[in-house]
Structure formats: C-alpha cells, structure tokens
Image: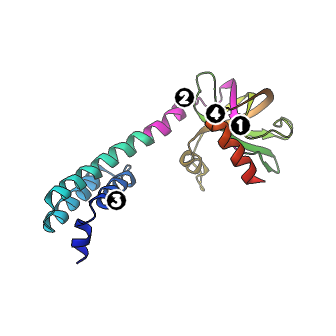
Amino acid sequence: MVGLEVVRRPWHVAIGTFALGLALAEAGIGLTGGVAAIALVGLSALRAATLGAVAGALVLCGAAVGELRLAAMDAPAERVRDGERVELSAHLLTRPRPSPFGASAEAAVTSGPLSGARLLVRAARWAPLPRGVRIGEELQLEGRLKALNGSSFDFAAHLRARGVAGELLLDDARRTGRRRGGLAGWLDGLRERAER
C-alpha cells in the first residue's frame, strides 16, 4: 500500500529525489548513480517506470546542482593569499562577537580582487572595530589575510560551511558612512532587531 501512495504523489517524489541529489553532491559518482538506479528500479517495480526514470534523473540533476553550488561557495577561498596585506571595503554581516583577545565578525567584501568573498574579521584589542558598528554598515578595512586551515576541532570546516573564504587579521577599520541598501539592507535591519 505504501508503494501505491508514493506513485500517487509524483510531485513529492520529484522534490524528494532532487533534494536527495543535493545531499549527495559530495558523494562519489558511484553512490549517486546507485541511488538514481535504485529510484528507477524501485518505482519501475511499482509500475511507475516513467516516474522512476524522472526520479533517477532528478537525483543526478540534484547532485550536479549541488556540486555547482559547492564550487561557487569555495571559489572565493582560492583568491585568499595567506599573509597578503590588503585594503578593502566590506559590509558587516554579523554583530561583532567579543572575546578575551578582541572581537570577530563576518563581512562581505565589496571591492578589489576579493569582491564577493565573505571574511571573518578578527579585531585585536589594540585594533578594534569602530565602536557601535552595526550590521550592514560599510567599513574600510586594512589587515593581513589568513587562509583557512584545519585543526583538531576543524574550525576552518565550520567557517567554510558558513561560506567564509578566509580570515582578515585587522590592523585598521574606518566607517565610510554608507550602508547596504535594497533587500539586503532591509534584511540587515530585521536581523539587527532580532538580535536585540
């Protein structure tokens, strides 16, 4: 009976198999192909060969889209040169999180060769972020880049999963007086109100 219920819900099967493909993006082609074949054979056994073929194809398409998404997320990290001194403009994406050594916050680079990259800005106590800086504000940042490297906890993998391409060890930060506009600026305001 469960099999017949599945066949009666082709949209659910389509969405589920595409999502499964997305989840298999980093899996090998053998596993992804095997799952697509199981979808094809399983649904064909329920006398829904067309749905099985579509489901198998959607598993493969989902995996391909997932690979492209992961490649797009990892591309900015290739532009981070460990130890390079940079001066760039960026929008603050998170509130500064204080620590015993200073503060850190995520920022989206808006100018230069790293444009589009997300960086974790680490501000030491002697080179702090401007007082009262808010999410969405544009800052002029100077500092040294640090590539993400693994460790025992693998904080780098955690940052990569958040879309962070590298770290910026801050030397100087100045407000430009500009903020993000449009939908991103509106969302910044919502996020800021939610964090209060």
Residue under the point 78% across and 54% down: 196
Task: Give the residues in magenta.
Answer: 71-94
Q: Name the residue carrying label 2.
A: 79
Q: Amino acid at mark 4?
A: Gly
Marks 3 and 4, the one that precedes in the sequence: 3
Q: Secondary structure at mark 4?
A: helix
Marks 4 and 1, the one that precedes in the sequence: 1
Marks 2 and 1, the one that precedes in the sequence: 2
Q: Name the residue carrying label 1.
A: 136
Residue under the point 34% across and 48% down: 63
Image marks 4 and 2: residues in contact by CB distance under 8 Å = no
Q: Name the residue carrying label 4.
A: 182
Image marks 4 and 1: residues in contact by CB distance under 8 Å = no
| Magenta stretch contains residue 43 | no
Q: Amino acid at mark 3?
A: Gly
Residue under the point 34% across and 59% down: 16
How much space separates mark 4 and mark 2, taking CA atoms? 28 Å
Binning the other alpha carbons within 10 Å of mark 1 as few (below 14), some (14 to 19) or many (20 upward) gives many
Q: Nearer the viewer, mark 3 or mark 4?
A: 4
Q: Name the residue carrying label 3.
A: 16
Front in this rendered view, residue 30 or 115: 115
Q: Amino acid at mark 2?
A: Arg
- Determine if residue 93 is in view: no
How much space separates mark 4 and mark 1, taking CA atoms? 11 Å
Residue 93 appears left or right of 132: left
- Determine if residue 103 is in view: yes
